[in-house]
Amino acid sequence: MQALYAVSFDIRSAQEQPGHVYESLRGHLADWLGHRGRVPAPSATELDRDGRAVLAGKITGHGDRAVSWTVAGDELTRALRMTIHQPLSTGPAQFVTRVTVSQSGEGGGLRIVMGREIPDGWIAPVQDPPLKRPNLLRAVLGDEQLEVRVLSQLATGRYERIREESHADVLLDVLALRTRLPILLMHPRDQAGWSAAADASGQLAGLAQVVTLNYVTAQAVRRAHEQVAPNDEKLSKDKDKRYFMFNGKRWDGLSHIKVRDAVSPNEVGRIYFALDSEEKRFIVNHVGLHL
């Protein structure tokens, strides 16, 4: 399988009930398979033993889902591994989702991998399937009985607001850590910006932490980290360079990331991009020197 998406979480009971974690995760997995009762699917109890099933696709036009799962371990340490194959409408490849739910000691774990499998000998290009965070992860993150973490960081699927300069100092300490998730800094200025922050925080759960800044905190971060550029005052005033056309639509390419900031200013690379909240994607406009 060519893996295109992978997240892994450490999970504990928020109510200090270790045995509750595995049962909760297994229940969420069963609900997700059955699209919360809309599609016939194995129950949580049936997931206690190895099995197979063919389930109807959740999305019109997609093929049936071939599901198989295995269970190993005992009451103290156990794991449920599930693999789901579904044909892609764009060719012979199949979309594959692998979910592992585990219990060990006082907690448990959840790992989700999504990708594609291409038949041996197929040499024609295969289009990458669209990827979105599975609703299984949304349900787990929204379960108040569970505490979900990645690299010891609490994962919520929501963005963090940094509004005071004192809080920016805490953010700077976090940015200096060597072991942490990537942090996407955003400076929303309108409803579209806030919607993009919400979408990004949900889709990047387990992959990156989204942090929103205001003018004061953005300047505090920028003074300490010149490579961080949630805004560009010069570009913001140059509409010809700031905005660009893509797929017949005008986009705001103000957001950018600096690359190799330790070199002289005329050699600093930049990646300018727009946030597409509807399609939940980044649209890169320019990779090179300052526009």
Image (cartoon, helix red, strand yellow):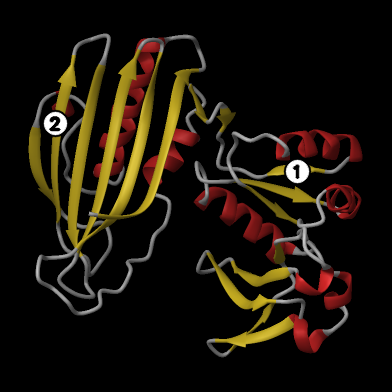
- Rendered image quadrant of residue 109: top left
Does 194 sit left or right of 109 as displayed?
right
Relative to 139, does residue 246 appear above or below in the rendering?
A: below
Which residue, given by chain and number where applicable, does mark 2 sit on? 70
Which residue, given by chain and number where applicable, does mark 1 sit on? 161
Does 66 sit left or right of 110 as displayed?
left
Question: From mark 2 to mark 1, how far is it between C-alphas?
Answer: 42 Å
Which residue corresponds to the image point at 25% horizontal and 66% vertical from the top-left? 60
- Rendered image quadrant of residue 159: top right
Specify the farthest residue to the front. 263
Which residue corresponds to the image point at 57% horizontal and 73% vertical from the top-left? 283
Does 233 sit left or right of 39 as displayed?
right
Q: Nearer the viewer, residue 27 or 181?
A: 181
Where residue 125 sits in the image (x, y, percent)?
Answer: 25, 78
Q: How many marks?
A: 2
Q: Secondary structure at mark 2?
A: strand
